[in-house]
Amino acid sequence: MHDLATGDDALHIVAADADRSVEATAGGYPGSRVTARLLDAGDERAVAALIREADVVVEALPGPFALPMARLAANCGVSLVSSMYLRDPQELDPRKIAATEQVIGELDRTAKERGICILPEFGLDPGLDLVLGAQALAELDEVEEFRAYGAGLPGPQARDNPLAYKFSWSPIGVMRSYRRPARVITRGAPVTIDATSLFEPGRHHIVDLPAIGAPLECYPNGDAVHYAELFGVRGTVREMARYTGRLPGHSAFWYVMVKSGFLDRAPVAVNGTSVTPIEFTSALLASQAQFRYGAADDDLSWIRADVRGRRGGASVRVVHDLVDRRDFTTGFTSMQRTVGFTLARGARLLLDGALGRSGLLSPIEVPYQLVFPALERHGIRVTRQELPNA
């Protein structure tokens, strides 16, 4: 909202939320540019009425709302950008997966018929990592290996709790990401890593980037096979995986927690009340101030696209890194910056019709030059290295 509301054009932003704090947030901007609206995201009729008043929707709700909001926007004929997945990465039931795919297919057809765009997964990770990955892949003639990384971490002075971690986004979203299977490509073949095995010893490797201030344990997380198909390298890439980075010790702790059932989704009875372990664990950690960012706490965001292959007959490795830190002038955390400014850029591209097509889009289809030069104005920069492919 900040980026759109402080631009030079005549955009008017309606900030909608069920929490009354949205009124105070909107009050920080001129009333001619931003107004607040109290709105329950579960009230589809009210949400649809508001969507119809808009030229574009910026959806920043928790994950389960992403697909319903995208459907509403498509049915209303209004373009939408979201930072979330339309598919539930945790879902394993083939029938539910098939039903979701049918809904997504219908959404794509409706959006094309209405001449509008639905752009999900357009935040940091997923989002900028996919734009960056497409750019890196385009630099090679043949791609042999592709590894993508993402991380949101406390800065060195904010690593002051037993987990050396603080929540910069939805705690339940973090917990769910810890309890979903990963798919990788190894020796050219797809391999599924069970959701209970992500943190097993031997699953992670170390990446040491000086800007982070500590080595990172990087464990597989996400569906690299799906993205190999979208990137067009499914039949040629020999090694491909997506990784999440955390500070040392994180994997060992969550290995015990996962194996002990603390992230299970099946409810258990507690004094006659049904409780899901994953929601209990999320609520317990989120309720403690030590796991939340304070006004003086720094945070870091990192994404990397590491591509190896051949160009002009020579073996080459290209590495793109983005490391961002909190802006204490505005108070925005790095996660707010890298997700929020990216969403704003996506909204601007949709308003301008800059993507040249309609329907359901992927960040992979959004050109690097339409995104990163605009983010550089906010100090969000990418470094590039070309290294021997050892």
Image: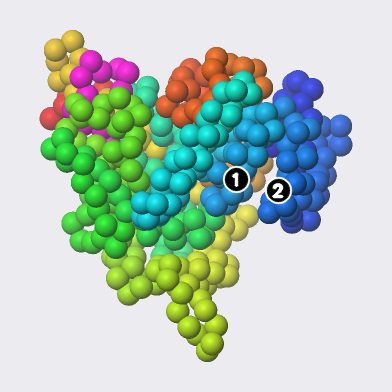
Above or below 368: residue 149: below
What's the amino acid at mark 2?
Glu
Does 52 sit left or right of 273 as displayed?
A: right
- The x and y percentages for residue 95 are 40, 52
Question: According to the image, label 2 marks what residue?
Answer: 44
Furthest residue to the right?
31
Nearer the observer, 36 or 182: 182
Does 41 sit left or right of 287 as displayed?
A: right
For disc 1, the neighbor class at 10 Å (few under 14, some 14 to 19, many from 20) is: some
- The x and y percentages for residue 243 are 32, 45
Nearer the observer, 163 or 95: 95
Question: According to the image, label 1 marks what residue?
Answer: 68
SS at circle 2? helix
Give the distance between the C-alpha atoms of the residues marked 2 and 1, in whole angstroms: 9 Å
Asked if the residues shown at circle 2 and circle 1 are in contact, with their CB atoms under 8 angstroms apart, the answer is yes
Say whether disc 2 or disc 1 marks the residue closer to the N-terminus. 2
Question: For the point 69% across and 33% down, which residue is it?
Answer: 76
Nearer the observer, 90 or 329: 90
Magenta stretch: residue 131 in it?
no
Q: Which residues are magenta?
A: 137-147
Question: For the point 42% across and 71% down, which residue is it?
Answer: 266
Does 242 sit left or right of 33 as displayed?
A: left
Above or below 6: residue 220: below
SS at circle 1? helix
Q: Is residue 25 visible?
A: no
What's the amino acid at mark 1?
Pro
- The x and y percentages for residue 88 are 45, 50
